[in-house]
Structure formats: C-alpha cells, structure tokens
Amino acid sequence: MSEARIEQAAPGELRLVGVLDFSTGPQLREAGKQMIRASKGAGLLLDCSAVEKTSSVGLALLLAFMRDAEAAGKAVTVRGMPEDMRQIAEVSGVTELLPLEA
C-alpha cells in the first residue's frame, strides 16, 4: 500500500506528502476537505513539494481541493507542483486553471 498524507504545515497552508494514487486518493480527499473547511483566513496554499510520485489522482485531488476552497471563499495558490503532475495537467488541458505560485 502506498503511503501518503495531507497535513497542515502552517495556518492557511496544506501540504500533500508521499505517493498520490488510487489507493491513497479517497482518504486524502476526505481529509483535505475537512481541513479546508476548518482553515481560517481568506487564502489557502496547497504545497505539493513533498509529493514523491503521482498519477492523475493527484491532479484530481488538487482540483477538488481548489473547488472546496472556492466554495469556502478562499483564494488558492499551488506551490511545488511535481513534474509528473505538471505533465498530466498539460496533457489534460487544465494548466491554465491552476493558480501556481510565481
């Protein structure tokens, strides 16, 4: 089984860690939704720099977390998107939807 988690790195900052795939996706989805709802402040930083490997599940999680944050009225920024996730986003045509940190 793959190991992955989502953690609060700082106020308004969630960090995805490990391998994002079909075996870790459902648990991460639910945990992330709860953490976003509980997050205070107007902004949310989604840090992907500790993602070791991802499938399309990782990109789907990121998009779902962005929807959750938008529904909660939070502006989202994505940091440290790994190359494999970036390539999946490009092939899927969603790169322009991602609020990547400059």
Image (cartoon, grey):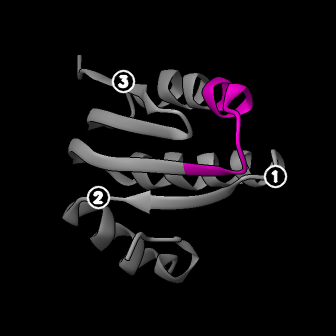
Please name the amino acid that badge 3 sits on. Answer: Arg
- Number of residues whose C-alpha sits closer than 10 Å to that of mark 2, classed few (under 14), some (14–19) or many (20 or more): some
* 15 and 30: which is toward the camera: 15
Which quarter of the picture shows residue 7?
Answer: top left
Residue that numbered label 3 is attached to: 5
**Mark nearer the N terminus (2 vs 3):** 3
Dot label at residue 80: 2
Q: Which region is colored magenta?
A: 33-44
| Residue at x 41%, y 69% (from the top left corner) | 101
Q: CA distance from mark 1 to mark 2?
A: 23 Å
Is residue 57 rendered to the left or right of residue 61? left
* 12 and 50: which is toward the camera: 12
Tell me whether the residue at label 2 lies in contact with that at label 3, contact meaning CB atoms closer than 8 angstroms. Answer: no
Is residue 101 rendered to the left or right of residue 33? left
Is residue 86 rendered to the left or right of residue 14? left
Please name the amino acid that badge 1 sits on. Answer: Gly
Please state which of the two labelled residues, at mark 2 or mark 3, is closer to the viewer: 2
Percent across and percent down for residue 10 are 44, 33
Percent across and percent down for residue 67 are 71, 53
**Mark nearer the N terminus (1 vs 2):** 1
Which quarter of the picture shows residue 6?
Answer: top left
- Number of residues whose C-alpha sits closer than 10 Å to that of mark 3, classed few (under 14), some (14–19) or many (20 or more): some
**Mark nearer the N terminus (3 vs 1):** 3
Is residue 46 rendered to the left or right of residue 71? left
Question: Please, which residue is most extreme toward the top here?
Answer: 1
